[in-house]
Amino acid sequence: MLTGAAWAQDKGLITIIVNDPANPYWFTEGEVAKATAEELGYTATVAAHTGDTNTESNLIDTAITNQSAAIVLDPANADGSIGNIQKAVDAGIPVILVNAEINQEGLAIGQLVSNNAQGAALGAQQWVEVIGDSGNFVELVGAPSDNNAATRSNGYDTVLSQYPDLVKVGEEVANWDRTQGYNKMQSLLQANPDIKGVISGNDEMALGAIAALQEAGRLEGVVVGGFDGSPDAVEAVRAGTMAYTVLQPVAVFSAEAIRQVDSYLTTGSTGVDTEKQLFDCLLITPENVDQYTGPFTLSAS
């Protein structure tokens, strides 16, 4: 709870709730949002629900108790988070969403996400360019509770279905997690020893797959593609173990979410006409990896 003195020194508390800061993507999301809020004169805290809607509910209760001026939320579940957000709104606290959407409009003051369909198409096209137009492959899929998982998987399929000789022989849900990616890749590899490629819904699962392939002595000749633009994935691209990663501009939209919150608290409007806002992704390959300038940023040079 903020003291009276603390309240006097700033514009109020912004509660930032991310998924899991053990993942560098979500860590960056929280840290950029917090730093931007503090630059604009707010006090900010970062908490994590780790994909659990009950934990998310408790964190929103705390934000209400602490009289937060606003909540920045990466929702735990496209459907399950709706009631939690409604609770904050009913308490008079505006909520803006980052990274993941909910299946309802008109509740949050904004939903700022990567253009996952565009990013998936970008990644799949690069993956085909590297692997060629024939061969067996497998896919690692993110958490089903997150709409991004289906959007990316569908985006991959839209591109890959144009190549009938590229055959998906296995698919596993690995919930955005490196350890699960490793375990699921081991199973997929045992069932499909002749694969030429792995296409993954995020970098953490892809890095887990790479570890499993390396352990099995099978990484050479297998094309692995990721999605996020995390520092570890960028280093894997640099090292030649990952073919590419699709960079999500999380640092951009996390900062923008805070600016829109500030505008809303100051003027009653975010200053943006549409609630759902898409931010295009960028491709990181061995050819441009040296333009990577820090967590989830790519220079224009």
Image (cartoon, rainbow, N blue to C red):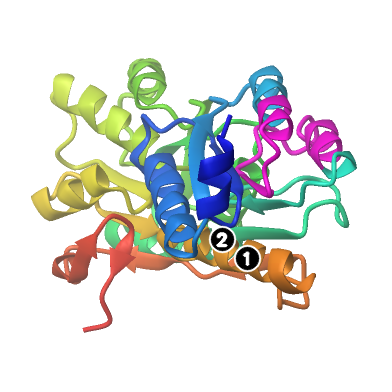
Q: Amino acid at mark 2?
A: Ile
Nearer to me, 68 or 203: 68
Q: Secondary structure at mark 2?
A: helix
Q: Which of the labelled discs sits on residue 258, or is there none?
A: 2
Q: Quadrant of the N terminus?
A: top right
Q: CA distance from mark 2 to mark 1?
A: 6 Å
Rendering coords of residue 284 (x, y %): 28, 63
Q: Which image quarter: residue 4?
A: top right
The residue mark sitting in front, 2 or 1, is: 1
Q: Which image quarter: residue 117?
A: bottom right
Q: Which of the labelled discs sits on residue 262, or is there none?
A: 1
Report whether 216 appears left or right of 26: left
Report whether 2 appears left or right of 243: right
Residue 155 position (above or below residue 290): above
Nearer to me, 243 or 67: 67
Q: Is residue 147 magenta?
A: no
Residue 59 position (above or below residue 279): above
Q: Secondary structure at mark 1?
A: helix
Give the magenta part as a residue range. Answer: 61-88
Rendering coords of residue 28 (x, y %): 38, 47
Q: Is residue 82 magenta?
A: yes
Q: Quadrant of the C terminus?
A: bottom left
Q: Is residue 167 visible?
A: yes
**Disc 1 crowd, CA 10 A, few/some/many (<14, 14-19, 20+):** many
Q: Residue at x 68, y 49 (%)?
A: 70
Nearer to me, 174 or 293: 293
Q: Are marks 2 and 1 in contact (CB under 8 Å)?
A: yes
Q: Amino acid at mark 1?
A: Asp
Q: Which of the labelled discs sits on residue 223, or is there none?
A: none
Residue 116 position (above or below residue 269): above
Q: Residue at x 44, y 41 (%)?
A: 26
